Structures are given as structure tokens and as C-alpha cells.
């Protein structure tokens, strides 16, 4: 019986293990402790240059609003969405868990920031066009579709 119980416990442990999130070899808890300059060393050159040149007032105000929204929500609740037009904002680790509404030119798309999004831009997750749905050809596509009988 001891061996059978051990096997069941091992199977249960295998079933519950989740893959740890790593960003360029750094675990999520350590990533959250990094400063902006230390984080900049881990991301691509264009984003690194932007952080080294200093985050301007709009991105800093946006991060402050995200902090405030996180602080105001309960321990197990999702924070309230923060609307923004800053599509070129680089997602930094302290944004993880926040809900952001990114403007796509027509409306605000709600996005929950996940650890896998770190280092990307907000605009990448709010598509500005409606993807083409290929179906039946419309009027004017070919000569045969031009003729529409009246009766």
C-alpha cells in the first residue's frame, strides 16, 4: 500500500506542476524587483534606447495610474481598467496583472497584462484593423459578378 500511495502522490504532483515563467533566464519574482535600468539590459535595442533616454511624463503618469488601480482593488480582484492612447508604451514587469484599455483608433480594447507580454509594446495587443474575412466575392470583383438579374 505504501508504494501505491507514493505513486498516486507522485502522479498528483506531476499533474499540478506548472512551467515557471522565465524572461531571458530570470524568474518572475526577480524580474519584479528590477529597476527600469536593470530591466532595460534584458530587452531589445530599440526599447532599451527608449528607457535609457528616460521615460517621459506621459508614460510615467500612466504607470502611476496603474499602481493606483492595483492599490485600490482587493487582494484577489482584478484592478479596474486604465484607458490609454499610449500604443508605443513598453510593457514593464510592474504592469503585470493590470488591466489596460488600449485605443485602436476607434475604441478601447481591454487587455490583461500577463508575464509573457513583458518587453512588447501595448499596441501589439490592440489591432487597428479588422482582419479580412475571405468569403464570396462582392460586386465589382469580376465581370461575371457584375451581372445581377432583376427577376
Image (cartoon, rainbow, N blue to C red):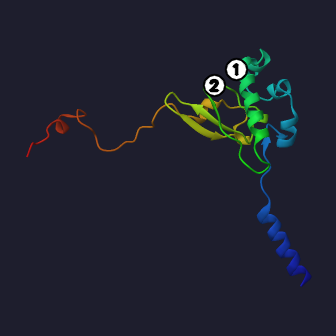
Q: Name the residue beneath numbered marker 1.
A: 58
On the image, which quarter does residue 67 sit in? top right
Vertical arrangement, residue 149 with respect to residue 107, above or below:
below
Q: Are marks 2 and 1 in contact (CB under 8 Å)?
A: yes
Assign a secondary structure to mark 2.
loop
Residues 104 and 148: in front is 104
Residues 77 and 39: in front is 77
Q: Residue at x 73, y 22 (%)?
A: 45
Vertical arrangement, residue 122 with respect to residue 96, above or below:
above
- Rounded to the nearest whole Å, what is the CA distance between mark 2 and mark 1? 8 Å
On the image, which quarter does residue 123 sit in? top right
Q: Position of residue 120 (x, y in %)?
A: 68, 32
On the image, which quarter does residue 37 sit in? top right
Q: How many marks?
A: 2
Assign a secondary structure to mark 1.
helix
Q: Position of residue 82 (x, y in %)?
A: 66, 34
Amino acid at each position: 500500500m505504501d508504494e501505491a500511495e507514493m505513486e498516486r502522490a507522485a502522479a498528483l504532483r506531476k499533474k499540478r506542476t506548472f512551467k515557471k515563467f522565465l524572461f531571458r533566464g530570470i524568474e518572475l519574482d526577480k524580474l519584479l524587483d528590477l529597476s527600469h535600468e536593470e530591466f532595460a539590459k534584458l530587452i531589445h535595442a530599440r526599447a532599451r534606447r527608449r528607457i535609457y533616454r528616460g521615460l517621459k511624463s506621459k508614460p510615467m503618469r500612466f504607470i502611476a495610474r496603474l499602481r493606483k488601480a492595483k492599490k485600490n482593488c482587493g487582494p484577489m480582484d482584478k484592478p479596474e481598467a486604465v484607458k490609454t492612447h499610449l500604443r508605443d508604451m513598453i510593457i514593464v514587469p510592474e504592469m503585470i496583472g493590470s488591466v489596460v484599455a488600449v485605443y485602436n483608433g476607434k475604441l478601447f480594447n481591454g487587455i490583461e497584462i500577463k508575464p509573457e507580454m513583458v518587453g512588447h509594446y501595448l499596441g501589439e495587443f490592440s489591432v487597428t484593423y479588422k482582419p479580412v474575412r475571405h468569403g464570396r466575392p462582392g460586386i465589382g470583383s469580376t465581370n461575371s459578378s457584375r451581372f445581377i438579374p432583376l427577376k
